Image: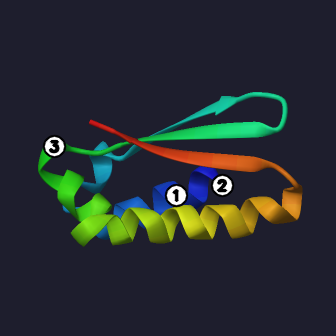
Amino acid sequence: MKELIKYIAQALVDNSDQVDVQEIKAQQTVVLELRVAKEDLGKVIGKKGRTAQAMRTILSCASAKEQKRVILEIVE
């Protein structure tokens, strides 16, 4: 899932080398922290948060197969 979010984020931003995804694991929950360059933050979030919400939807579908809960946090 970490690679999936990194792939999507790199396709959206201009500075793809500055995309970083950290994975924090708990028992049934995984938190993915997405960091991008400051000027690319708006591209990852999208208008009214639609791009970020779409990425979260993709994650929830992918994580349902593994029966885990995945949370995406976009960090400045």
| SS class, disc 3 | helix
Give the answer, above or below, for where 71 lies relative to 54.
Answer: above
**Residue at mark 1 to residue at mark 3: CA–CA distance:** 18 Å
Which is nearer the N-term, disc 3 or disc 2? 2
Q: Is residue 28 above or below residue 44?
A: above
What residue is drawn where x is 69% and y is 39%? 30
Location of mark 2 (residue): 1
Name the residue type under label 3. Lys
Which residue is rendered at x = 26% and y = 67% of the image? 48
Q: How is the image coloured?
A: rainbow
Which residue is depicted at the point 30% across and 60% down? 44
Q: Badge 2: how crowded within 10 Å, few (<14), some, or many (20+)? A: some
Callouts 1 and 2 close, C-beta under 8 Å: yes
Q: In the image shown, does 59 or 8 lie closer to the viewer?
A: 59
Q: Quadrant of the N terminus?
A: bottom right
Q: Tell me the kind of residue under disc 1.
A: Ile
Point out the image quarter for the C terminus.
Answer: top left
Give the Cα distance between marks 3 and 2. Answer: 23 Å
Q: Which residue is mark 1?
A: 5
Residue denoted by label 3 = 38
Q: Residues within 10 Å of mark 3 (few under 14, many from 20)?
A: few
